Amino acid sequence: MKKILSIFISLIFILSINVNAEEKLTIEKQLVGIVGAISGTVKTETRELKAGDKIYLNETIYAGASSGTQILLLDQSTFTVGEDSEVVMDTFVFDPETNDGKIVASVKQGSLKVISGLISKKNPDSLTVEVPEGTLGSRGTEFQTIVSKGKTDTLLIGPGKNNTLGMRPGAVLVGNKFGQTLLNNPYSTTSMTKNKAPGQAKRITKNQLKKFNKKMKALRVAKLTPSDAKAERKVLRKELKKELKSLGFEKEEIKTIIKQNIQKDKEKKVAIKADRAEKKKKAKAEKKKNKKKKAKAEKKKGKKKKAKAEKKKGKKKKAKAEKKKGKKKKAVKKKATKKEKKKATKKKPAKKKKAVKKKPAKKKKKAVKKKPKKKKKAVKKKPKKKKKIAKKKRIVKKKKAAKKKKAKKKRKKKK
């Protein structure tokens, strides 16, 4: 419907140039376009705008909170002004016979969405939007910009390179005296701040896209309400019929023009839907391919990880087994050395004890048998001396044994 209205407006502009036209506009009041849709309070310096109102050159459009408007320009371009915005149409030159012209608009604050028309088709570099941080050069496309304090964000919406409608691929040149950035992929965005070159083009995130859509939310809500939409359409049709009648068109001609334009609009909508469906199919196919690739890559990674883990486990097991074997060998050797030492220590004192026991016993028995009972004094004196000698020998042997033990302990400690 918007494009139909823009076509009508262009016809009005063509016929208004003729001598028979009733209205002759001065340079100060040059017609630029018509308000197609509106929501909330949208004003200029002198009046409050309504659907069907005319927009003139150098008029500043103010859109308040939760408000917005859509302006259909004479070259079939569409300017959508978002909430809390201030937009001015600084330059508008259009020749309907050749589609030559130039459009310059400036956004002081808020958001502006642009769909280029006939002027951009003829010369893609002829539509520019000025922002506080630099300029946005449209090259036959659809884009949106948000101007906030000290920063401007720009989003290229489309169309893409291989669109089914045969439209020129979209592009926006964002630049200032410090540098330039070209947005030529749909849904790519860049930011520009004061005294700095624009940032690199990046794929827009979901949160950023929500921010851009939020600025146009008020106008979308207004369009979704059926009663308001119908009323707006009726008002627009009445005003268009009046304009066409004033230019000399008959009722039947007006009806045929409207029907033809409606049919064209429907055909375009069908083509756009088909294009979207194809894009969705391609996107799904690409997602499936990417998932398969990821799954394969993950499997390979998993196999490699398992192999590495198995190798590590094998190495650890071998190391543990070797350590255990070494420990066992050392323990066996230690036990053998201990046993040998124990045997050596046990054997030596046993021999000495036997020798010590035998000697005194034999002497005592012999002394007792040989000597008679009468000689009691001699018998008593001799064994006493022998007992003292035996005791001394035992003490000496014990000291020697103790010394040997101490020597062995010292050797063990040194080892």
Image (spheres, helix red, strand yellow):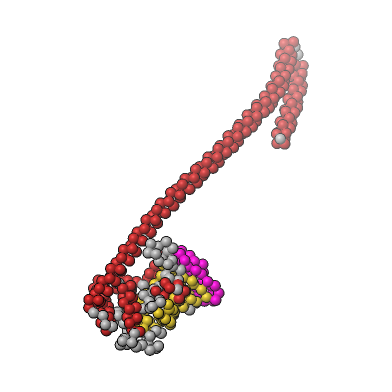
Q: What residue is at 52 percent from the left and 71 percent from the top? A: 180
Q: Looking at the picture, tell me which residue is in the foreground, 351 or 302.
A: 302
Which image quadrant for residue 241?
bottom left
Q: What residue is at 34 percent from the left and 60 percent from the top? A: 274
Residue 381 percent coordinates (x, y): 76, 19
Quadrant of the snapshot with the C terminus: top right
Q: Looking at the picture, tell me which residue is in the foreground, 111 or 376.
A: 111
Residue 282 percent coordinates (x, y): 39, 56
Is residue 53 magenta-colored?
A: no
Left or right of 182? Residue 253 is left
In the displayed structure, 286 sits above or below 87; it is above
Which image quadrant for residue 263?
bottom left
**Is any part of residue 107 visible from this angle?**
no
Left or right of 26? Residue 226 is left
Q: Looking at the picture, tell me which residue is in the foreground, 3 or 201.
A: 3
Is residue 203 magenta-colored?
A: yes
In the displayed structure, 363 sits above or below 117; it is above
Residue 239 percent coordinates (x, y): 27, 80
Q: What residue is at 43 percent from the left and 66 percent from the top? A: 169
Count of numbered circles in the view: 0
Range covered by the magenta-colored residues:
177-205
**Is any part of residue 170 visible from this angle?**
yes
Quadrant of the snapshot with the N terminus: bottom left
Q: Looking at the picture, tell me which residue is in the foreground, 302 or 390.
A: 302
Which image quadrant for residue 78?
bottom left
Q: What residue is at 49 percent from the left and 43 percent from the top? A: 303
Residue 236 percent coordinates (x, y): 27, 78
Left or right of 358? Residue 103 is left
